[in-house]
Structure formats: structure tokens, C-alpha cells
Amino acid sequence: MKLSVIIPCYNEVETLSKVIEAVRQSPVQSIEIIVVDDYSTDGTRELLQSSLSSSVDQILFHNRNQGKGAALRTGFAAATGEIIIVQDADLEYDPQEFPLVIDPILEGKADVVYGSRFMGGKPHRVVYYWHMLGNRFLTMLSNMMTNINLTDMETCYKAFRREVIQSVKIEENRFGFEPEITAKIAKLQCRIYEVGISYYGRTYAEGKKIGWRDGVRAVFCILKYSLFSKTVSPLSTKTIQEKTFVSAEMKR
């Protein structure tokens, strides 16, 4: 089994090297690292073109800044692993927990797994109260629209079977990706699991980028993709059974 790790980055020159090294040191044996630079201006691009060029499998450059969703769209299309996971280019999420996130897929139980910051007993850095409250509100609103019971819709750690994520047309360019993909996989009737993960949140002084405008956009995206987007055909029972067999073979 090969795991494709998609790292979208924008102005992460201070942390990108450490993140790539952490991904390389994860317990998963076969990893494909794909970095998508979203037109960084702080030296990240030059770092990728020089000292980091041999540390990753693919480096993809945008010729203008578009946002996280656009970077993920580029990365997902290039991935070749049986499972694809998102890894932010900061140090908020720990690649040592990759096995925890992808195990439900390997065991043939899930098509998609979310790593939740709000369940389980993993350590969390204490940061912004209003961000936490906003995340919980957006997750609740998303759950109301999709009729699924996630605890952390906005989490970075999302793992997908490759054929699932590559079948979804991603329209959002920025952080609207999170509610968009949640609504679309819910309509596909994917088997979705959650696992508790640790979280080492950073401050704005340390480079955090999401803001209140992204929260407003998230509300719009929840309503748009849950209520007004084109209905998609759910994954068939036969397809799920075939994937379960493939997963069992991959884990062997």
C-alpha cells in the first residue's frame, strides 16, 4: 500500500523542511510526498527548488496564489497512492499519527477518515477559544445539512481512497474546500470514520492564516454544496465490497 501525502504550502519557509522530514519519519513504509507551492513569496519556492528538491517525490508550482483548495485540487490529481491524506505545511499535525488515520481504510471499514481534534485523549495546545467555538458551529451546521455526525469538519487530517477523492470535482479555491468536500462525500454516501488526533495549534504570529472571512465563506459553502449543488450518484454496494477486498489485500 502506498500513501500519497499532499502538502499544500504558502509562505512556509520556516516549517516546511521540518514537516517533510516528519512525514519521511512516519511509520508508514511506502509514502509519496507531493508538495504544491501556491506561489509563495518568502523563499519557500527557492527552498523547494534547491535543498528540498530531492526530499519529495513531486513538486508542483502555481503561477499565482489561489488558496488551499486549489493547491489540494492540483495535488489530488497528481497522486498515485491507493490512499491520499492531507498534511498542512506547518507543525500543527503529527505525521506519526498517519497509521491511526488510515487504518479504518486499510481494514476495509471506511472510504474516508477524518482526524478529529475534539475527540479522544490526545494532547492539544491551548490556543484560541473563538476559533474552537467557530469550528464547532461550522461542524454542527454542516452536520445538520449532511445528516452525518462529525465532531471536526474543519480538520486538516482527511484521508481518502484515491478513487473517491479523484472522482470529486473540487470547486473551492480557499478554505471552503473543507465544507465542500464534506458535503460531496456525504452525497456519495461514503463510509466516513473519525479518529481522535493530537493538535499543536499555532498563533497568527507563528503564521496561522485562516480568518473570519473564511468562516463566513464556510457557512456559504455548507449551504451551497449541501442544498444547491448537483446530486451525485452514491457509491454502490458492489463498489464498496470490491474496495473492501482490495483493502484487505493491501494490508497484507
Image (tube, grey):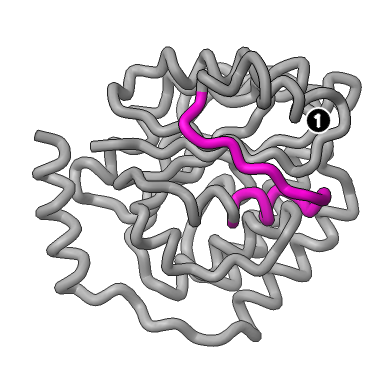
Q: Which residues are magenta?
A: 56-73
| Residue 91 vertical position relative to residue 79 in the rendered view, above or below | above
The N terminus appears in which quarter of the rendering? top left
The answer to which image quadrant residue 204 occupies is top right
Q: In the image, is residue 63 part of the stretch drawn in magenta?
A: yes
Q: Position of residue 75 (x, y in %)?
A: 55, 48
Q: Exactly how many numbered labels are in the figure? A: 1
| Residue 164 vertical position relative to residue 113 in the rendered view, above or below | below
Would you call the spot at circle 1 few (<14 residues within 10 Å), some (14-19), or many (20 or more)? some
Q: Position of residue 179 (x, y in %)?
A: 63, 61
Q: Amino acid at mark 1?
A: Asn
Badge 1 marks a residue whose secondary structure is loop
The answer to which image quadrant residue 16 occupies is top right
Residue plotted at (63% across, 33% down): 88
> Which residue is more in the foreground, 41 or 2?
41
Q: Is residue 124 left or right of residue 231?
A: right
Residue plotted at (15% across, 36% down): 251
Q: In the image, is residue 111 part of the stretch drawn in magenta?
A: no
Q: Which residue is mark 1?
A: 11
> Which residue is more in the foreground, 189 or 50?
50
Q: Position of residue 95 (x, y in %)?
A: 48, 23
Kindly tell me whether residue 75 is visible in this rendering. yes
Q: Is residue 33 left or right of residue 16?
A: left
